[in-house]
Image: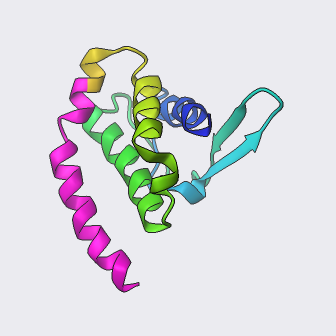
Amino acid sequence: RAASAADHAIRRLPDAGGGHADLNVKNLLLREGPDAFEVLVIDLDRARVDPQVTPRARFAEIMRLWRSLVKRSLAARVGPRGCARFLGAYTRGDRTLRHALLAGLGRERLKLALHALHYRRA
């Protein structure tokens, strides 16, 4: 439920032409209500405005968030089903956006592997 709520908060920022300079799990404020989670994106001090946020920039932000989950050993709690729910809700049936986002998956997996080498040492 939290992953589905996070997609709305994370998608609103680029939809409004904004980019978060450091989107990570510590910059998401989660509040559980009686029926659903509410998620707020915080720490916008280095946010930028761009009238046309590209799918590549969107995916880079999403993957920065994913790397922070991996770094803090929280990725397993989200799991593949949580990722699929997040992506499905984020793209809201927009196959063009989904395809454009996933086009960078190989590059982002490599970046994650490189970052993970550092996580093990830290």
Q: Residue at x 49, y 27 (%)?
A: 16
Query: In the image, is residue 107 part of the stretch drawn in magenta?
Result: yes
Q: Residue furthest bottom?
A: 121
Instruction: Please name whichever residue, 31 or 40, is drawn nearer the observer in this view of the structure.
Output: 31
Q: From the viewer's perspective, is 34 left or right of 68?
A: right
Quarter of the view holding residue 118: bottom left
Tell me, yes or no, if residue 45 can be seen here: no
For the rendered model, the colour scheme is rainbow
Residue 80 pos. (x, y %): 39, 41
Magenta part mainly helix, strand or loop?
helix
* Residue drawn 41% across the image and 52% down it: 66
User: Hey, which residue is sitting farthest right in the picture?
Assistant: 34
The residue segment tinted magenta is: 99-122
Query: From the image, which quarter does the C terminus lie in?
Result: bottom left
Task: Compare residues 18 and 96 and report the one nearer the observer.
Answer: 96
Is residue 36 in view? yes
Residue 83 sits in quarter: top left
Q: Is residue 22 magenta?
A: no
Asked if residue 115 is positioned above or below residue 74 in the image, the reply reads below
Q: Is residue 35 above or below residue 58?
A: above
x%, y% of residue 36? 73, 29
122 vs 100: above or below: below
Q: Position of residue 62 (x, y in %)?
A: 39, 44
* The N terminus: image quadrant: top right
**In percent of the image, x 21 and y 43: which residue is there?**
105
Q: How many marks?
A: 0
In the depicted structure, whether residue 28 falls above or below residue 87: below
Q: Position of residue 110 (x, y in %)?
A: 18, 58
Name the one closer to the observer, 10 or 35: 35
